[in-house]
Amino acid sequence: HIFRLLMHASGVIFSIDGMIGNARLRSVLKANPIHIFISLGRWSMLGMSVSTGAIIGAAVWAVVLPIVGFLFFRAGEDTYGG
């Protein structure tokens, strides 16, 4: 469910800049890792503009998510495989 919520909040279906008037909410939605990587994909494939914040955000998410995933699965390692 979390991935589905992230996908729906990523701005794939709607423009975050055009639909969200609240600046704080817009900043939170733009920090969504799926939105960041979709923006980078649009930039690389379509030549659309990308912000420096998206590049920095992608670098941060690329470091943070594997570490958090490793720690999460390492904590439950004893319960895997019966």
Image (tube, grey):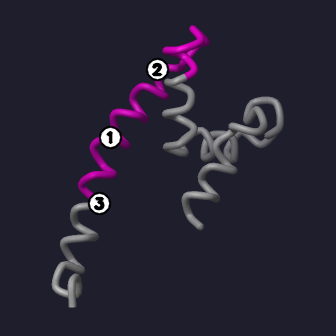
| Quarter of the figure that contains the N terminus | bottom right
* Separation (CA) of disc 2 from disc 3: 24 Å
Q: Amino acid at mark 1?
A: Ala
Kindly identify which residue carries mark 2. 52
Residue 55 colored magenta? Answer: yes
Q: Amino acid at mark 2?
A: Thr
Which of pointers 2 and 3 lies earlier in the amino acid sequence?
A: 2
What is the quadrant of residue 47 in the picture?
top right
* Separation (CA) of disc 1 from disc 3: 11 Å
Main secondary structure of the magenta stretch: helix
Which of pointers 1 and 3 lies earlier in the amino acid sequence?
A: 1
Residue sitting nearer the eye, 61 or 25: 61
Magenta stretch in the rendered image:
42-68
Q: Where is residue 36 drawn, in percent x and y? A: 52, 34
Which of pointers 1 and 2 lies earlier in the amino acid sequence?
A: 2
Q: Amino acid at mark 3?
A: Val
Residue 68 tag number: 3
Is the residue marked by circle 1 packed among few (<14), some (14-19), or many (20+) residues within 10 Å? Answer: few
Q: Where is residue 70 drawn, in percent x and y? A: 22, 62
Q: Secondary structure at mark 1?
A: helix
Relative to residue 41, is residue 45 depicted above or below? above
Is the residue marked by circle 3 packed among few (<14), some (14-19), or many (20+) residues within 10 Å? Answer: few
Q: Secondary structure at mark 3?
A: helix
Residue located 61% across and 12% down the image:
48
Judge from the rendering whether residue 7 lies leftward or rightward of residue 56; answer left or right.
right
Name the mark nearer the viewer: 1 or 2.
1
Kindly identify which residue carries mark 1. 62
